[in-house]
Each structure stands twice: as C-alpha cells, then as structure tokens.
Amino acid sequence: MLFGRKKKIKTALGGVSFSVKKGEILAMLGRNGSGKSTLIKMMAGILRADGGSLTVLGLDPYKDRIRLAQQIGVVFGSTHPQLFWDLPPMDTFNYIKGMYGIPQSTFDRRLKYFIKMLSLEGVYTRQTRQLSLGERMKCEFVCSNLHAPTLVLMDEPTVGVDLPSRMAIAEAVVKLRNEMKTTFVITTHVVDDVANVDRIVMLDHGKLVFDGPQEKMRALFKKSVIVELYFNGKGHLGKYSKHGNVVMSREDYLKLEMEPDRVKQRWFIDMLNDEAVVDYRINEPSLGFMLNQMYKHIDKKGSHRGAEND
C-alpha cells in the first residue's frame, strides 16, 4: 500500500485592490484565514507577492525593505515582541534610538510625550517580564512610533489586552493621526478597536468584500433596529419573538432585529403596558452585530455560488 499526501494550492490573496490615504486610520477586518496578516506582512516587506503590484510609500516593500523600514512602524501583537524580555523597555527604547539615529533631544521629547499619553510612569523602567500584557503592548506601541514613522502597521495588537490599555492604545492612535498625520492600518478581531477608524476594509478567503466608512456599512442595515426586552419571569418569549428575527434569547430576555416601523405599531405600545415586561431598549445595530450579519451574508452568497457550480 502506498501513502502520499494530497496537494492543494490555496490563494492567500487574489484580486485585492485598494489604497490608503495619508493620515487615514484603516481597519482591516475578516475571519481567521481571510488574508489580513498575509497582506500586512506583504506591506511590511516580509512576504513577496507572486503576482500583481504593491506599493507602500512609493516603494516596493520587498525590494526596498531597508528604505521602507526607516519610514514605517510595525506592531505584531504579543506573539512577535520587540521588547527584550529580561530588560526594561527603556533599554529597548535606547536601542531603537541608536538603530534609527534619533537625536538625543528628539528622543527625550518623544519619550516624554508617549510616557504621558500612555500612562507609562513607573512602567518603562521595570523588567519587561514583570509587566502585564497591557503594559507590554503599550510599550510595544512606543517602540513602533519613537522614530515618527509615516505609516504604522498593527496586526491584532490588542488580543487579550485589558480594557484600559486597549482604550489607551486606541486613543493614542487617534492622537498621533491628528497631531502627526500618521497613517495606521490595523487588523483586529476586537470590535472596540474599530470604533474610531475612518474606514473599514473587509477580506474573506483572500478577496475584498467591503471597502468604505462605517457609515456605508451602517447604510446596509439602516432598515433594522435592535429591540431588547427584559421580563419579570419565564414563559413570555413566544408572545413577542414573532415580531422580529430573534438574535438572542433566554428565559427572561429577548433580543430582536426588526424594521423600524414595527416599533410604531400597536403591539409595541401594548407591550409597554404588559406587566411581564420590566424594561426595554431600542438601539441601532452595533458594529459587532453588523459585522456578524456581513459574515452571514458572505456565507450565504458563497453557498449559492457552490450550488450553482454543482
């Protein structure tokens, strides 16, 4: 009996085309395997494309890696740290100062700026291995911005990071864009990271499936509202679940997606007078909800294509 491996060639990215403006904060979203990290590594000059063209700051990222490295910063999350594990972040900062030839006065001014902005007092002088993940990632962010890059690539920088540190990094991104005109390209699975971005690019199976501002994505779901109902006991779900698409339910809670006009109808007014309903909320779809709906829409289109090809 002979054994052999079956080979299958998978296209990591195909037909992806977009540009990023100077000073723009762009979020690159997509599920695992969609091609986000591959594209980031190509933009950083780590990987080379088999075909097509890619230009970053007017340079070929792979051929002009050294020249490009002087103008970009990269944060690859906690899996590819820049910080020296047994040394304080300050030692890494000094190493970066020498590597990029940053004048001492400029270095001192920028370091003071980042320490205050990210609340790193008493943090950057301790050993890296003694720091929390959130503290390390804030210091990683400093490493990538000390030389004042034109473009910063951030590949899932806040996975597992605590909320205060995540918010501090998000605020720092916006502040650097506003004050330094720094361009940011961020891949993430954390919806909160997308709150202040200017534009969203979504990839799926190596293809571009959405490109536009958050308002464009919201426009796709403008005919929906999210209604949350809280009950004072069990047995009330069936009475109201028929009025919309059930997003989530438990014994005393129901979350529905429905058309905005539905909340103006008589049933909704009667519901407010129902003693079983102790509270309710009406909101526009959250970004997380919209992204989930986008994925469902993509999957649905994919299944239709598969049926057509059978």
Image: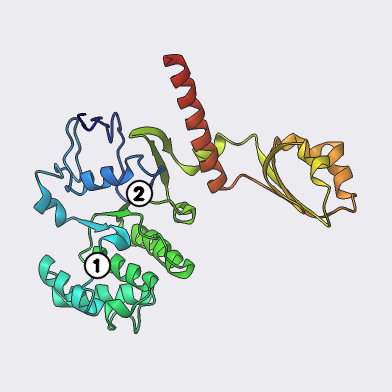
State whether residue 42 is above or below residue 297: below
Quadrant for the N terminus in the image: top left
On the picture, is 104 further left or further right than 133?
left
11 above or below 175? above
212 left or right of 62? right
Q: Residue 24 carries which label?
A: 2
Percent across and percent down for residue 309 are: 41, 15
Circle 1 packing at 10 Å, graded few (<14), some (14-19), many (20+), is: many
Q: Viewer-nearest of labels 1 and 2? A: 1
Tag 1's secondary structure? Answer: helix
Q: Which residue shows up at 34% across the image and 84% down it? A: 122
Tag 1–tag 2 contact (CB < 8 Å): no
Query: Residue 149 appears in which quarter of the rendering?
Result: bottom left
Identify whether 45 is placed above or below 202: below
How many numbered marks are there? 2
Disc 2 marks a residue whose amino acid type is Glu
**Residue 49 vs residue 221, the one in the foreground:** 49
Relative placement, left or right, of 120 versus 48 is right
Q: Earlier in the sequence, mark 1 or mark 2?
A: 2
Tell which residue pokes out farthest to the front in this image.
1
Q: Which quadrant holds residue 43?
A: top left
Q: What element carries label 2?
A: loop
Distance (Cα) linking label 1 and label 2: 21 Å
Which residue was labeled with disc 1? 143
Q: How crowded is mark 2: few (under 14 residues within 10 Å), some or many (20 or more)?
A: some
* Quarter of the image where one finds residue 103: bottom left
Identified at 36% across, 34% down, the residue is 205
Residue drawn at x 51%, y 36% is: 294
**Quadrant including the C terminus:** top left
Q: Which amino acid does label 1 sit on?
A: Cys
Q: Picture coordinates of residue 227 (x, y %)?
A: 72, 46
Provide residue 40's location: percent of width, then percent of height.
27, 47
